[in-house]
Image: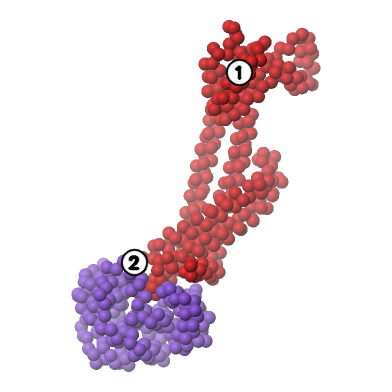
Chain colours: A purple, B red
Amino acid sequence: MIYFNNVSKIYKDAVALNDVTVTITAGEFVSIVGHSGAGKTTLTKMILAYDIPTDGTVFFESLNVHKLKNKDLTKLRRRIGVVFQDFKLLPNKTAYENIAFAMEAVGKTDLEIASDVPHVLELVDLSHRLHHFPNQMSGGEQQRLAIARAIINQPELIIADEPTGNLDPINTHEIVQILKKINDLGTTVILATHNKGVIDSVGKRVITMENGKVIRDTNNGK
Amino acid sequence: MTELKRITKAGFINFKRGGSVSMVAVIVVIITLSVITAIILLQAVFLFSLNVIRDKVDVRIYITKNTPEDKIMFLKSSLEKLPEVAEVSYMSAEDNLADFRLRHASDYPTIAALDELNDNPLLATFGVKAREISQYETIANFLKSNNASLMVGSVSVVDHTNYYNNKLVMDRLNTIISGAQRLGFLITVILIIISIIVTFNTIKLTIFIAKEEIGVMRLVGASKMYVRGPFMIEGVIYGIVATIVTLILFLPITIWLGRNMTDFLGLNIYNYYISNFFQIFAIILLSGIILGGISSFLAVRKYLNK
């Protein structure tokens, strides 16, 4: 599904990715681990074409993501759900509107929006926060809302970049369980984290990165 | 259609939720539109004053005594055919005498001297107004060059004109008027450019606040237009609200100016404002909408390419 072919990214004074070659198949749950600055976030940004590689290519199925025209890139992004450490919710929109926006962006009808949004909010246990703004919600609730937004359009891939970084252990556990459930339903999940506990609780494929290089790729969840 | 409806609705909601940011943007647009409205009113006063000055200037052509009427009429029609001529008015020698007596009614020695004369000493005249002050010279040259066709025997129909007596004053007036027009235009352009820059930067600032939001919208798969649209609608709303407030604000201002400054300005600003209200409204509304909409369009562009 996703192919990184000898991808390197060099910023002015730092190497973020150093000749990375990785293949991720559809339906996998892949954790990318490493210390801060190891290159986890840069790697996930490459899939979204949010960053351009200095060298190498990134394919999403048969699409070279960095060669896509603007319109096609928008279409690709609609096939990917994204969850960030800092949630990246739209601050001036309510929980309902944040999710509705993602649906409107892909051209869903008002009827579909009205029926699906309450349902997905119920899935992440936020039914009681329907008309609250992000700043009126706790960190855990905001992250659950971000996940709801990421899954609402039934994407083929979920990228979660440090989704538990700002959360307490209880909320962390909840988020990991939700991501596992999403993966069980067939969606590919890429989870970037530096939390060992999270990786252990997932127990799936782990790619370890250091100084922009993949130093280990195991399937035993360690 | 659904997308347009959603974009419009989002623009309105953003404006409403923008709170103080929206208010600041509207205030800045009000300032810009007020500058434009003030310029429109000042230009009206300026043009009115210029027209008053222009109206006071004319060239008088004195007709030689005993010129046959057909020759006078020929001169009149020749003058009227000139593209530079705006108006030709004829006064017979009798009319000029009556006018003279009226103007000097309290000047007893002059009237007494006039009564002593058996004959009317005044000549018939043409008052000629040119479209522009600079065009009087052309008219004067025409009278000279056409003299052959305006002869009665060996005597010219035109006894003399006062153009050459007034030439210096006219030239100076012409320089002042064209200088004032150029200066007025320059000041107008500078003020409008400054106002547009200030407005653009304020709107740019309001969008800078939302730059991360724009990035998120793009990441969840929103098209450029779907991201940009609400910001443009918000910009247009700034323009519409600012237009309404500006035009309301100018109502008491023009009433006061109309009551207290009409003598000084020579023009009742309030009457001008009311009688040209729809034209001013259209100019200000269009300026507001274009300013708000285009500023937003340009300001969002910078953050859309992620």
- Are callouts 1 and 2 both on one chain? no
Q: Is residue A40 visible?
A: yes
Q: Position of residue A32 (x, y in %)?
A: 28, 83
Secondary element type, mark 2? helix
Number of labels in the image equals 2
At 51% from the left and 41% from the top, the residue drawn is B185
* Residue shown at 33% from the left, 69% from the top: A72
User: Looking at the picture, how far across and down is residue B289, in whole percent?
Assistant: 52, 57
Quarter in which the C terminus of chain B is drawn: bottom left
Q: Residues within 10 Å of mark 2 (few under 14, many from 20)?
A: few
Name the subunit of mark 1: B
Which label belongs to residue A70? 2
Which SS class for mark 1? helix
Q: Which residue is mark 1?
A: B74
Q: Nearer the viewer, residue A99 or B188?
A: A99
Mark 1 and mark 2: span between their CA atoms?
76 Å
Quick check: marks 1 and 2 in contact, CB under 8 Å?
no
Relative to B283, residue B153 above or below: above
Q: Amino acid at mark 1?
A: Phe
Quarter of the image holding residue B98?
top right
